[in-house]
Image: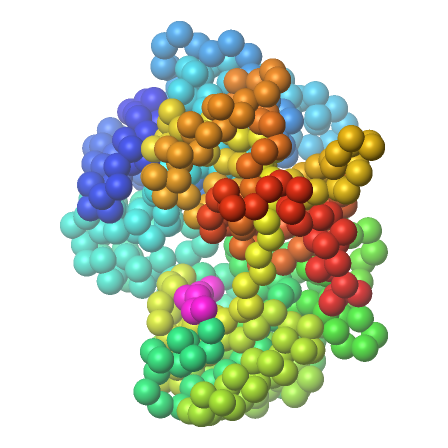
Amino acid sequence: MLFHDVVATSTAVAATRSRLAKRDLLAAALRAAADDGGPSGGDLVEVVAAFLSGRPRQRRTGIGYRSLTQPPPPADAPILTPLDVDAALETLSATAGTGSQAARAAALEHLLATATADEQRFLRGLILGELRQGALDSLLLDAVAAAADVPLAAVRRAAMFSALSGPIARAALTGGAEALAAFRLEVGRPVRPMLASPAPDVAAALAGFDTEVAVEAKIDGIRIQLHRRGDDVAVYTRSLDDVTDRLPELVELMRSLPTDAVVLDGEAIALRGDGRPMPFQDTAARTGSRDGEATVRVPLTAYLFDALHLDGQDLIDAPEAERFAALARVVPPSALVRRTVTADAEAAAAFFAEVLASGHEGVVIKSLAAPYDAGRRGGAWVKVKPRHTLDLVVLAVERGSGRRQGWLSNIHLGARVPGGAGDDGDGWVMLGKTFKGMSDETLAWQTQRFTELADGPTDGWVVKVRPEQLVEVAFDGVQRSSRYAGGVALRFARVLRYRDDKPVAEADTIDAVRALLEPHR
């Protein structure tokens, strides 16, 4: 099996809308890896599964965007295997110490020079975490079940207890259901976090429940999973990265609990002296995430909301009410998330308003009877947040890839700077990019529109356009950013609609965007 085969599968997956067709394409690639692997069949399956999920086995390679902007001339014919690429990424990840920057650059140059043009494009997306092929992790797990002819429930159950899908694919295709059954909760090994589905408001969220629910404050911090056995403590993020050494205050909290073995779930956040939250990146900087640009290492406060294991008893299948009761037995009240249990819509709405007034971002409404469905986004947890919107101008657009090949896709968003262009008009400052919220009809329209507005040179990927088109975007918040000249960036922006009813002179200003930081100050 060649790396080219993996890239071809990814391209085919991106080109189809059918979930069933996507699953079958992925399953065929996994079966081919198992059949072609020989003695290293398990390794090959694991690597191929990782690549097709858009996430290599190496969590960090030390390679950033700039290193991939000018690749060497591509190879004429494919010769790389998936294991070749995995080994090269492992070398990049392990390179450290004096001279590491030059060594890493040379290793990357060699890898890219050995790759064809299509392989180079795939590698760029894989390394940067920007593969948009429609092969989400849940879909890959469906494909694993199909490829190995094992029950999907067995695959999903095993995946709850593995940070990556590659080991699940290896187990399923080399050992079947018996190998999958060996995956279970283990103190010290992270569990995939349970996720919440969105609802537009409290009333809509409550409509999915017919009895009392827990309404919890939604904290805009970092998701943390805390493990302790004896004096050994581990702290993991939402993406299951180990950040124990960066969060000593959480280690201290865990060691203070009256328990010997425990696994807890919650959020950690940086607070001001008055108890209100600080900007998100003050929290994120403590874990070294890409959003963390703060320079002051502020202490973090934990707000815990779930217990998955307590002193030899796995609670992952227990109802939420039982899990929270176990949590409350061992965690001090100051470390418990604020919550109320009610079936009354007015009481839930009042609690939502109180949470927003305290500076936090919303609520999560939870079924008291539901188990902890790790790694899944179902109806047992429903999150409600107020929606922010802005009218911004499109400054540039990027050429699409995969299923969006041939279209102009990712748009660069700009806020207005009154008088920023001098006496003759306004200027513009970039706030970020988005490709979310675009239907095929929207993509077709904006491809024509921005082709007409194209202005100035292009690097082959980014097309600059005249600032003449407004777009309304929704977003989750604003954070400080040193990446953009305005000093701020939008979090999770997505397109709502293009505004042809408003002139660009009515676009929201950079000062209005910066003012959205004020509630956190």
Q: Nearer the viewer, residue 194 or 173?
A: 194
Q: Where does residue 220 sit, x and y in percent of width and height?
A: 62, 66
Would you say residue 416 sits in the magenta stretch? no
- Residue closest to the far left: 149
Q: Nearer the viewer, residue 129 or 409?
A: 409
Q: Residue at x 54, y 50 (%)?
A: 473
Would you say residue 196 sits in the magenta stretch? yes
**511 up-or-down from 36: above or below:** below
Does residue 411 show up? yes
Please name the predominant secondary structure of the magenta segment in the image.
strand
Q: Residue at x 43, y 16 (%)?
A: 117
- Residue closest to the far top: 76
**450 up-or-down from 349: above or below:** above
Does residue 336 show up? no
Q: Where does residue 265 sit, x and y in percent of width and height?
A: 54, 71
Q: Nearer the viewer, residue 512 or 208?
A: 512
Q: Nearer the viewer, residue 182 or 287?
A: 287
**518 up-or-down from 500: above or below:** below
Quadrant the C terminus occupies: bottom right
Q: Residue at x 60, y 27 (%)?
A: 466
Q: Residue at x 62, y 32 (%)?
A: 467
Q: Is residue 17 left or right of residue 322?
A: left
**114 up-or-down from 383: above or below:** above
Q: Where does residue 387 sit, x and y in percent of width and height?
A: 54, 63
Report the colour scheme.
rainbow
Q: Where does residue 77 sit, x and y in percent of width and height?
A: 36, 10
Task: Give the quarter of the image for residue 354.
Answer: bottom right
Quadrant the N terminus occupies: top left
Number of marks in picture: 0
Q: Is residue 430 left or right of residue 381?
A: right
Task: Give the quarter of the image for residue 487.
Answer: top right
Which span of residues is magenta-colored?
193-200
